[in-house]
Amino acid sequence: MRGLFRYEQKDTIMHRLDPRVKLCWVFGMSVLSMLFGTPLLLLAAFLSTFPFWLMIGPSRAKVRALLFVFGTMVFGFMLTQSLFYYWGDPENPTFTIIPATFMVIGQITGGIYFYAEGALYGLIQSLRFMTTVSAASAFVATTHPSELLIGLVRFVKVPRTDRWIGVPNEIAFMVSSAVGFAPSMIEESMIIINAMRARGLELKGGIRTKVKALRHIFFPMVVGLLRKGRQIAIAADARAFRAIKNRTFVDELQMRRGDYVMLIYTAALVISGFILSSIGFGGTAPGLGT
């Protein structure tokens, strides 16, 4: 999990793409996951991110982390939706786990039932999340925070002028810092856990033992993150952040042939998603009208 949100410095096709193009691709995959409403189309959208991962060539640790995240999503969504699917017919569940007449639990919950429609709906929702997470993870793994900052601030240039359309510098700085903050937070927690283990903290055992251990880990981690955030703020002030409205950058972004090909590919995906959704392959819940 430590390397899941970390930028990997490599020289691949995905790394050479313009960060603005990759942002458009992630946004397009998110829109596509919302447009589709059938498992097969959502699975195809999810699998469409795999060729880009092959270009990146991720490490085994990152592959294991992604598989763990995706497996947890599928299992969690299918389990919860199969038990709490409120679109299903309460009188005709697929099968009964705990009847309403069962003492205590059945009387409190009114019975626990399994709905096959809910499991299918959970699969659909998990595929939607997996598509977006896969694209976003590929974006983070191939985009340096400084490139993300430039791409957000200078997203589109106004023709025949020197003006750029993008998000404010403050928001772009916040987003780029947050992207780099996630791996730092994970590393900070691992350092604290190892330090606490060296001092005799016991992490093995039941839930009560883990809760007690969490109390000793949580506060040092929060203090460390606040200290690191203060250091970032001091560094930004020392470099005169927000002193002028229009900043200059050492590296300028330039669109290349591969960037335009990627934009056309993304636009074709989104347009296909709108067409397929309009002819009946959209929707939000199985069994309901699209």
Image: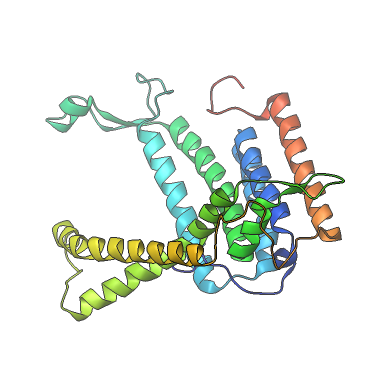
Q: Which residue shows up at 39% across the image and 70% down it?
A: 187
Q: Quadrant of residue 8?
A: bottom right
Q: Which residue shows up at 76% across the image and 47% down it?
A: 163
Q: Which residue shows up at 69% across the image and 63% down it?
A: 249
Report whether 209 appears left or right of 131.
left
Q: Position of residue 34 (x, y in %)?
A: 60, 35
Of 281 and 32, nearer the camera is 32
**Above or below: residue 96 compared with residue 39:** above
Q: Position of residue 246 (x, y in %)?
A: 67, 53
Q: Which residue shows up at 15% across the image and 62% down it?
A: 209
Image quadrant where one finds the N terminus: bottom left
Q: How is the image coloured?
A: rainbow
**Above or below: residue 74 compared with residue 119:** below
Of 119 and 102, nearer the camera is 119
Q: Position of residue 266 (x, y in %)?
A: 75, 46
Of 218 and 121, nearer the camera is 218
Report whether 208 appears left or right of 167.
left
Residue 143 shows up from this direction: no
Q: Which residue is situated farthest in the front direction here?
A: 243
Residue 248 shows up from this direction: yes
Report whether 245 appears left or right of 199.
right
Of 240 and 233, nearer the camera is 240
Image quadrant where one finds the C terminus: top right
Q: Position of residue 164 (x, y in %)?
A: 74, 48
**Above or below: residue 20 compared with residue 91:** below
